């Protein structure tokens, strides 16, 4: 399909989707209460969480869209925009709410905005605000398999800038949490405060969002799915995912890898026909790329990508990684 036809089809589906989803929100039934039949897909904004969530949900899964958004869910109003929790920290209210999410009892217009099935048999929780308490969720709900999707910081920063997304307010949400500063960010405050351009600030947000889970999880405990590997080696990555979630990916999954997700924007490579892995190298100048990568290096996370468009960490088989 040509890029122009792909864009036209995407625009048509985007116009029709709200009415269909509104009807399904009223009619669907999720009667499966097993926590193990939920999959958590975590990541940063613009990292591919919606795309991966759609792939995993297939034709039988219920997608729960960002159920830990404190500005959308009344039960979470007291939490930061990007909540940080220590793995052993007590929080009965969040634990009770998390059980509603992973058991499928929660219903909410925001959470069910991407509902696509009348009788789902399992759940995929797509979340971009859980990175800083991902280990806490693992401790509270060990039955729930977790996947953390990671995408190149330059690709994420470019996408966020194109959308005009906030920087200062996101960073402030980090800095206002004293435990987060004490546990992880104190050595990096100078780097965060030194960031001046939008790209440097977006890079700082990317770094904080990955620094915490990579430090909190032990090696081999956190399953990382690199966006680039999923694009380039889908069969291999889907086999890895199947081993973690204990659920086979349907044959139609490979076809869905090339379909735009509901959060795709008009400039996305999947619509324009550009290379999804290297598109940012054409749209950012050498100076801009250096801005981003200098921030990443200052956080000590440059081992993930360095100056390559591809991840530099081995995740094949059972090998994973952590950051002490």
Image (cartoon, rainbow, N blue to C red):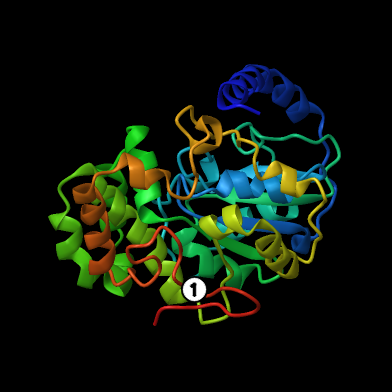
Image coords of residue 105 (percent x, y) = 74, 47
Disc 1 target residue: 87
The picture places residue 165, in percent across and down from the top left corner, at 34, 36
Say if 182 sits above or below 266 in the image.
Answer: below
Above or below, comparing residue 286 to residue 302 in the picture: above
143 sits left or right of 45 in the view: right
Q: Which quadrant of the view contains residue 241?
A: bottom right
Left-right relation of 128 to 35: left
> Which SS class for mark 1?
loop
Q: In which quarter of the image is residue 183?
A: bottom left
Q: Which residue is drawn at 60% across and 18% down?
A: 8
Residue for point 73% across, 65% down = 239
Whether residue 276 is visible, yes or no, is yes
**Left or right of residue 165: residue 271:** right
The residue shown at (61%, 74%) is 316
Residue 238: percent from left, percent from top: 70, 60
| Displayed quadrant of residue 26 | top right
């Amino acid at each position: 399909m040509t890029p122009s036809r792909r864009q036209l089809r995407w625009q048509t589906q985007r116009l029709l989707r709200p009415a269909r989803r509104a009807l399904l929100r009223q009619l669907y039934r999720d009667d499966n209460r097993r926590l193990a039949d939920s999959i958590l897909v975590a990541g940063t904004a613009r990292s591919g969480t919606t795309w991966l969530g759609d792939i995993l949900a297939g034709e039988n899964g219920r997608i729960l869209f960002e159920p830990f958004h404190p500005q959308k869910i009344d039960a979470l109003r007291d939490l930061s925009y990007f909540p940080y929790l220590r793995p052993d920290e007590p929080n009965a209210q969040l634990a009770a709410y998390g059980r509603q999410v992973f058991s499928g009892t929660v219903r909410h217009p925001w959470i069910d905005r991407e509902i696509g099935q009348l009788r789902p048999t399992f759940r995929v929780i797509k979340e971009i605000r859980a990175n800083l308490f991902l280990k806490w969720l693992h401790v509270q709900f060990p039955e729930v398999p977790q996947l953390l999707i990671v995408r190149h910081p330059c690709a994420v920063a470019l996408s966020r800038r194109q959308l005009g997304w906030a920087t200062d307010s996101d960073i402030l949400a980090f800095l206002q949490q004293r435990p987060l500063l004490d546990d992880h960010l104190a050595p990096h405050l100078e780097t965060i405060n030194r960031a001046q351009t939008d790209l440097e600030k977006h890079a700082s947000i990317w770094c904080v969002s990955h620094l915490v889970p990579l430090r909190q999880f032990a090696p081999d405990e956190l399953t990382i799915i690199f966006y680039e590997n999923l694009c380039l080696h889908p069969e291999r990555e889907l086999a890895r995912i199947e081993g973690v979630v204990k659920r086979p990916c349907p044959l139609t999954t490979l076809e869905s890898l090339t379909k735009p997700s509901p959060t795709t924007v008009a400039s996305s490579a999947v619509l324009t026909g550009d290379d999804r892995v290297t598109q940012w190298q054409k749209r950012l100048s050498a100076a801009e790329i250096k801005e981003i990568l200098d921030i990443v290096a200052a956080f000590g996370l440059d081992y993930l990508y360095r100056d390559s468009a591809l991840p530099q960490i081995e995740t094949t088989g059972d090998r994973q990684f952590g950051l002490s």
